[in-house]
């Protein structure tokens, strides 16, 4: 197809406009923040996202003079949105080798010491070696750090473990005796039992999983407005100094 000079100029301008539109999406998209339900760090109170980690995130936003909605999703969906949508923040996320280059890691907001948890009356469960866990029914949250760790250790989904949308689902399966083990942080057990109206002595923390002692972060999609990223980083630095 032969284009005259006028058509060529119009095509060139159109391509320039298209490139500008694609590269400026991060600058025009509003800031969004996603997280998962994970008491006491991320909870719903009075129809608002709250919790210990949420308070740290809100302090950063206030210091940066930035407003953004915080939405709770199942972890897999929250992670997908944070990975694919410009100007999106996510917390509380472990910084793994695979995730490290995909985000800006802004600030630590939570600490976790995960390990094996069962019902208190399951005295038959013995875990001297990791391989012994394969004989029990395990549930973890889909695509979270525990799920990824089990796969790396050679555990096979639907054979050695199943997945749930969130930690609340995993706890319900444990309480209802549909599974034998969950992976939970020792500091979060009592809070979750209280929320589920269960006795504090109804479960036992069997043993720590050293590889799952982690720092969890507030992180940002790599396609974020540079000026917005700078404001957040300055806010974090200011809060750290205070």
Image: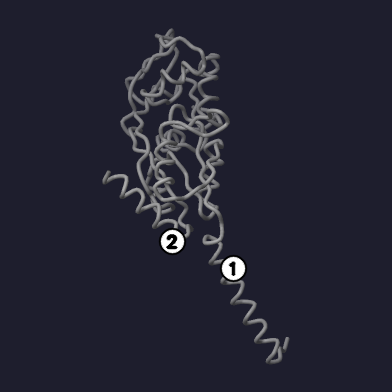
Query: Which residue is pictured at 26% across the width and 46% down the height?
Result: 241
In this rendering, the answer to whether 87 lies above or below 111 is below
Residue tagged 2 = 226
In the figure, residue 214 lies in which quadrant? top left
- Considering depth in this image, is 40 or 15 the residue closer to the camera? 40
Name the colouring of the figure: one colour
Residue tagged 1 = 21
In the figure, residue 109 lies in which quadrant? top left
In this rendering, the answer to whether 16 lies above or below 63 is below
- Badge 2: residue crowd in 10 Å (few <14, some 14–19, many ≥20): few
Query: Which residue is pictured at 38% across the width and 26% down the height?
Result: 185
Report the residue that reaches farthest toward the right.
Answer: 1
Report the residue that reaches farthest toward the bottom.
Answer: 5
Residue 236 pos. (x, y %): 34, 48
- Which circle marks residue 112 in the picture? none
77 vs 135, left or right, is right
Q: Which secondary structure lies at badge 2?
A: helix
Residue 18 pos. (x, y %): 61, 72
Residue 26 pos. (x, y %): 52, 60
- Considering depth in this image, is 188 or 64 the residue closer to the camera? 64
Q: Quadrant of the N terminus?
A: bottom right
Residue 93 pos. (x, y %): 42, 40
In the figure, residue 187 lies in which quadrant? top left
Q: Which secondary structure lies at badge 1?
A: helix
Q: Quadrant of the C terminus?
A: top left
- Comes first in the chain, label 2 or label 1: 1
Report the residue that reaches farthest toward the left.
Answer: 241
- Badge 1: residue crowd in 10 Å (few <14, some 14–19, many ≥20): few
Query: Which residue is pictured at 40% across the width and 34% down the height?
Result: 153
- Considering depth in this image, is 77 or 140 the residue closer to the camera? 77
């Amino acid at each position: 197809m032969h284009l005259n000079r006028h058509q060529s100029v119009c095509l060139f301008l159109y391509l320039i406009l298209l490139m500008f539109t694609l590269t400026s999406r991060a600058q025009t998209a509003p800031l969004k923040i996603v997280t998962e339900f994970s008491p006491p760090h991320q909870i719903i109170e009075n129809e608002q996202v709250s919790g210990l980690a949420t308070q740290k995130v809100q302090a950063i936003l206030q210091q940066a003079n930035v407003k953004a909605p915080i939405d709770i999703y199942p972890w897999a969906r929250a992670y997908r949105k944070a990975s694919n949508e410009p100007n999106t923040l996510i917390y509380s996320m472990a910084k793994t080798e695979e995730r490290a280059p995909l985000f800006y890691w802004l600030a630590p907001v939570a600490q976790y010491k995960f390990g094996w948890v069962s019902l208190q009356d399951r005295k038959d469960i013995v875990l001297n070696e990791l391989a012994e866990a394969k004989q029990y029914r395990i549930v973890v949250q889909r695509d979270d750090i525990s799920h990824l760790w089990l796969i790396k250790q050679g555990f096979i989904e639907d054979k050695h473990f199943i997945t749930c949308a969130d930690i609340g689902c995993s706890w319900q399966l444990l309480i209802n005796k549909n599974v034998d083990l969950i992976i939970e942080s020792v500091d979060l057990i009592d809070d979750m039992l209280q929320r589920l109206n269960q006795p504090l002595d109804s479960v036992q923390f069997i043993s720590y999983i050293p590889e799952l002692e982690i720092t969890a972060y507030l992180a940002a999609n790599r396609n974020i407005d540079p000026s917005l990223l700078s404001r957040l980083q300055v806010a974090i630095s200011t809060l750290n100094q205070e």
